Image (cartoon, helix red, strand yellow):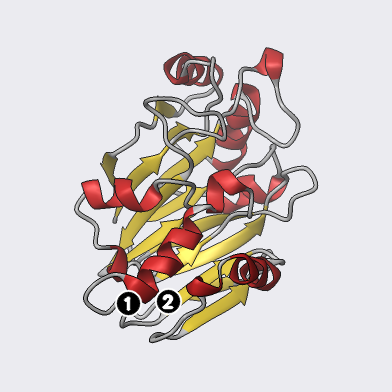
Amino acid sequence: MRVMILGTGTLVPAPEHGTSGLVVTAGKDNLLFDGGSGTLYRASRLGLDWREMAHIFYTHYHPDHSLDLVSILFASNYAPPEGRGDDLKIYGPEGLKDFFAAVSRAWPSVVPKKYNLYLRELTSGESVEGSAGWKVFAAQASHGDALALAYRVTDSRRSVVYSGDTEYSVALAELAQGADLIICECSTDDAHKAPGHLSPSGIARIVEESGVERVLLTHVYPPFNPEELALQCRRMCGASVEAARDMSIYKI
């Protein structure tokens, strides 16, 4: 299993931090989690063929996590020579079908023409299983008024958790139990904690309760320094904590 970080940033433009998105390669499948603006272009720079990303998981539908859905659907219809051929499956919390319907009204050209699109709304505790041997579990996240999920990807040997945008929650700590890695948002330091988001003390609590030993920080707001936030986390917990970087690949 490997993780390719496409974006570690937020809604605030930053030169070295694109909006949220990552790919987990499990078996022969590339699973896309979230996808703000520019996700497809950064994926191509890592040599990923967007046509081979047949499974997309959204943690929630805020623009910095979902804007490139329009690009994916548009390319699937019109990219030469014939767009997408294989099915596309999209998963997310409640509201996915309404979200797609709204996108389709705004851009009718994204409605699938030559391929099958499947939309599945997930609730906490549900899972998705792929033919390549992977399984994705969903758990409720706590992100203000937004309906949001965190995910755990497992294959026969390894497991990776992606928090999405969330505060501390028991559900997230339980989801991370025994995981090899958690990719966890850390929006600010503790002194400036934003509602609906994590800061170092919340991450330390998740580490303590889950026993996870490796943490990648993402979704850091400017002007906060990701490396400094990682240092603060390490001082509070016994895990290996580092700041994720755009366009980086991590083997699990």
Q: CA distance from mark 2 to mark 1?
A: 9 Å
- Residue 103 against residue 189 in the figure, above or below: below
Secondary structure under the numbered disc 2 in the rendered image: strand
- Residue 227 against residue 181 in the figure, above or below: above
Write down the quadrant of residue 239 in the picture. Answer: top left
Tell me: 39 left or right of 57: left
Label placed on residue 147: none
Look at the image and tell me whether residue 176 can be seen: no
- Residue 53 against residue 45 in the figure, above or below: below
Write down the quadrant of residue 190 in the picture. Answer: top right
Which residue lies under the disc numbered 1?
Answer: 84
Tell me: 13 left or right of 81: right
Can you give x and y, in whole percent of width and height, for residue 25 in the image? 30, 59
At horizontal 38% and vertical 32% (from top left) the residue drawn is 244
At horizontal 55% and vertical 29% (from top left) the residue drawn is 12
Q: Quadrant of the N terminus?
A: bottom left
Can you give x and y, in whole percent of width and height, for residue 227 in the image? 42, 17
Which residue lies under the disc numbered 2?
Answer: 88
Q: Total number of numbered labels? A: 2
Secondary structure under the numbered disc 1 in the rendered image: loop
Look at the image and tell me whether residue 85 can be seen: yes
Mark 2: few/some/many CA within 10 Å (<14, 14-19, 20+): many
* Amino acid type assigned to the residue bearing label 1 in the image: Arg
> Label 1 near label 2: C-beta < 8 Å?
yes
Can you give x and y, in whole percent of width and height, for residue 228 in the image? 47, 13
At horizontal 59% and vertical 23% (from top left) the residue drawn is 200
Tell me: 184 left or right of 38: right
At horizontal 54% and vertical 53% (from top left) the residue drawn is 66
Tell me: 148 left or right of 17: right
* Amino acid type assigned to the residue bearing label 2 in the image: Leu
